[in-house]
Amino acid sequence: MKRILFTLVAVGMLISLPASAQLIDEKDVTVTMDLQPVLQLDMTTPNQLEFVFDDINEYYAGITQYAATVLKVSSTVSWDLYAVGRSNGTNGPEFWDQVIDYGNSNPNAIPDLPLSLLELRQAQANNGATAAGATATFADYSQAFAQTAAPSAGNSLYVNGGTNTPPSNQDKYIAGHSGTAGTGVDAMAGGSFLINGGTTSDFYYSIDYRILPGLPAIFPMAGDADGNTFEDLVTANGAGSYAEPGVYTMYVQYILLEDQ
């Protein structure tokens, strides 16, 4: 009988699979980015500013409170900043609220004191008010307080009659101005006082306040953009009229808004 011999030979084979045949498992994560516009106004100021006129020299020379308010702006969009005078409307939306009347029954004593008699001065000029159509004689509050007998309205606070109406192209802004969005000449570019020059930048404003009653108390230096002054009330009420003695209150609202 013949034997049949089977020989088993082990052969190693290395097979390289093409890349297209590689197994892959993929998962996706969706990432959403929401860029919210940020307008941030930081204000450092006393809770209340008091102007007490109990000396004849104070009536004549006025009282100035220097650097009483500091405004710091941070924004991701183009912006404008303005101040507006407001009251609770006791004497009307454009007048100071009379809290205490010292009992002066003189018919020439006027209790309606315009909010615009408060004067502001900003240390840093408005560098965003060069827009065509910004026809205001005073585009901001950067000029020195007037010392002449004629009101200039250069520092008188903007008043809008209790509405939410921003200043027009004939009124004062602290920064930026009324105009067309996107022109780049009527608004302040986004940025922050933290990284743009600090106290000397377009994002930092120090505000002085002045009230000058005058003798008699008719606030001769103050006026609004339309040229209206307390003296107009004197004219309407009769010669010899003056501000009625008493305690009055109002407040200044600073508004930072996206340029439109």
Image (spheres, rainbow, N blue to C red):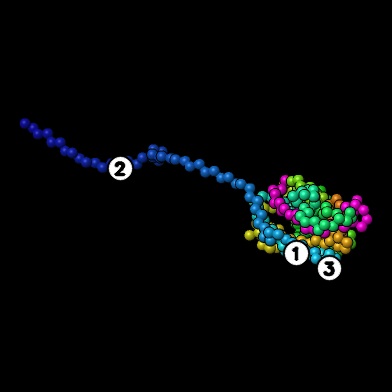
Tell me the residue that label 2 is attached to.
Answer: 14
Under tag 2, what secondary structure?
loop
Under tag 1, what secondary structure?
strand
Under tag 3, what secondary structure?
helix
- Disc with the residue nearer the chain's start (3 vs 2): 2
- Name the amino acid type tagged 3: Asn
> Any mark on residue 65, and which?
1
Mark 3 or 2, which is nearer the eye? 3
Query: In the depicted view, which residue is nearer to us: 184 or 209?
Result: 209
Does 236 appear in magenta?
yes
Mark 2 or 1, which is nearer the eye? 1
| Residue 56 pos. (x, y %) | 84, 67
Give the Cα separation between the discs numbered 3 and 1: 16 Å
- Looking at the rendering, the stretch of residues picked out in magenta corresponds to 232-260
- Disc with the residue nearer the chain's start (3 vs 1): 3
- Name the amino acid type tagged 2: Leu
Does the image show residue 116?
no
Tell me the residue that label 3 is attached to.
Answer: 57
Count of labels in the image? 3
- Disc with the residue nearer the chain's start (2 vs 1): 2
Query: In the depicted view, which residue is nearer to us: 257 or 64?
Result: 64
Residue displayed at 21% across by 41% down? 10
